[in-house]
Image (cartoon, grey):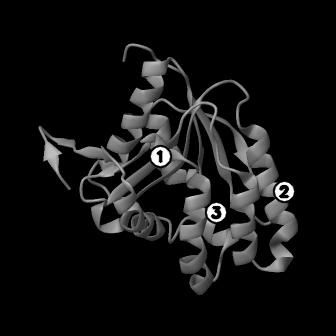
Amino acid sequence: MGVVDGVAVLTALTPDDLEPALATLTSAFVADPIIRWAIPSAARYFKAFPRFVRALAGDALARGTAVGADDLSGIAIWLPPGTGPDPMRVLPVIYRGAPAAMRPDLDGFFGQMAARRPAARHWYLPLIGVDPPGQNRGLGTALLRHGIGLADRDGLPVYLEATSRRNRDLYARNGFAVLGRIQHGGSPTAWSMLRPSSPGM
């Protein structure tokens, strides 16, 4: 990972970066509580998750808001106001990778997730991940703060869902507050979180 004056070097992803970025995110989320609850089969996970990322990322690549470390060991997908993932593309990927008996819990969980997203203009962080060998070096924080800077520039809040307690605590240290819990049936708990805008920071 490139570092200048102790700060990770982040760049906007190009189409040539897409496959390595998908590999990084697939590695980063391999033990994610929510994703692996939804797609418990390892064989299905490694096939479905890259498709899930493509669907969730929307047009972030074209907009220049998909960013990564210069060696692509960490990736963040940021969606600006007025954009968002298309549920008609995202949910079928999850449902194809999940046991049929889980469908009611998946419907309930993702229904809650959609309902909690703010109606007001905001930046949205659907995905951020660091390949395990690169974790605990501050890269995740650098990726997070990059997007926070974009939102602060626009005078807008940032919204996300934390899918683990560890991530929830990282986001809390960076100014995010928990809005509520997302949980249905046998699902693990996720947390909807919002960071108010801080113009001028």
Query: Residue 100 location in percent, x, y?
Result: 83, 78
Tag 2: amino acid: Gly
- Image quadrant containing the N terminus: bottom left
- Image position of 159 with respect to 170: above or below: above
Q: Is residue 183 visible?
A: no
Other-residue count near label 2 (Cα within 10 Å), few / some / many at <14 / 14–19 / ≥20: some
Picture residue at 73% right of the left edge, 49% below the top = 182
Looking at the image, is mark 3 or mark 1 earlier in the sequence? 3
N-terminal of the two: label 2 or label 1?
1
Mark 3 vs 2, N-terminal side: 3
Query: For residue 90, what is the image quadrant?
Result: bottom right
Query: Circle 2 sits on which residue?
Result: 108
Q: Secondary structure at mark 1?
A: helix
Q: Circle 3 — which element?
A: helix
* Residue shown at the point (76%, 45%) measured from the top left: 114
- Give the position of the C terminus as an image quadrant: top left
Where does label 3 land, which residue?
Answer: 34
Between residue 53 and residue 7, name the one nearer to us: 53
Instruction: Please provide percent x and percent y for residue 196.
Output: 55, 22
Element assignment for label 2? helix
Q: Is residue 39 visible?
A: yes
> Residue tagged by mark 1?
62
Q: Is residue 94 left or right of residue 21?
A: right
Q: From the viewer's perspective, tell me whether residue 26 is left or right of residue 186.
A: left
Residue at mark 3 to residue at mark 2: CA–CA distance: 13 Å
Q: What amino acid is labelled 1 in the image?
A: Ala
Total marks shown come to 3
Q: Separation of disc 2 and disc 1 at Cα? A: 32 Å
Q: How many C-alpha atoms fall within 10 Å of the one at disc 3: few (<14), some, or many (≥20)?
A: some
Marks 2 and 1: which is nearer the front? 1
In terms of image quadrants, where is residue 134? Answer: bottom left
